[in-house]
Image: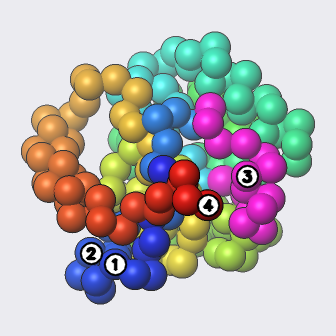
Amino acid sequence: MRFRKEASPRWLRRWCPDEHVSSVAEITPARLQAHGICALLLDLDNTITPWRSRQVPPEIAEWVKRMQAAGIKLCFVSNTRNLGRLQRLSEQLNIPYARGPMKPRRAMLRRALEMLSVSPQQAAIVGDQLFTDIWGGNRLGLYTIWVRPMHPREFIGTKVSRQVERWLLKRLERYRVDESAS
Ligand SMILES: [Mg+2]
């Protein structure tokens, strides 16, 4: 589903994604290119792998290959403290990673844009959390894609912010684009 971010009130807009998808596999090169997007900054936990897992589900690994084959540039922007795991997944999927202060701070996202040689207008951030991925992406003027978390298992602090996310989602509902009308 898509949202009319510009129609939402200012206090809410920072957490308003441009799109909400149930899995990254719904994101297609054609859909990105329609928005002038050629690069994706990817969250790791609960977006590409379950939380703390080293296993990439096969359908996600295939999606990564499809994106790469279509010339979409990819870079990990993860708040994980486990650098070893991030490095292994980076090698396994052939996706570089940027490091820096945690999202929603912008430095790591800026670094990723530099690594991929793209402008904020050419990039989207893809992640499962409104308060890190989407907020950080909106602060930098990226196209923001909110993904339903892959698995309910997650960091205890995240479980708390999920309750606030649910409350926000109710406020965001009224800015949903009616896709049947378009
Ligand atoms: Mg995540």
| Residue at mark 1: C-beta within 8 A of ligand 1 | no
Q: CA distance from mark 3 to mark 2?
A: 25 Å
Foreground: disc 1 or disc 2: 1
Question: 144 and 75: which one is in front?
Answer: 144
Asked if residue 159 shows in the view, the reply is: yes
Quarter assignment of residue 102: bottom left
Above or below 122: residue 180: above
Look at label 2 and name its amino acid. Leu
Is 3 magenta? The answer is no
Foreground: disc 3 or disc 4: 4
Q: Which residue is mark 1?
A: 8
Q: Residues within 10 Å of mark 2 (few under 14, many from 20)?
A: few
Marks 4 and 2 in Cβ contact (< 8 Å):
no
Q: CA distance from mark 1 to mark 2?
A: 6 Å
Q: Earlier in the sequence, mark 1 or mark 4?
A: 1
Is 26 magenta? The answer is yes
Residue 85: mark: none
Q: Would residue 120 appear left or right of 135 to someone viewing this image?
A: right
Q: Earlier in the sequence, mark 3 or mark 2?
A: 2
Q: CA distance from mark 1 to mark 3?
A: 23 Å
| Residue at mark 4: C-beta within 8 A of ligand 1 | no
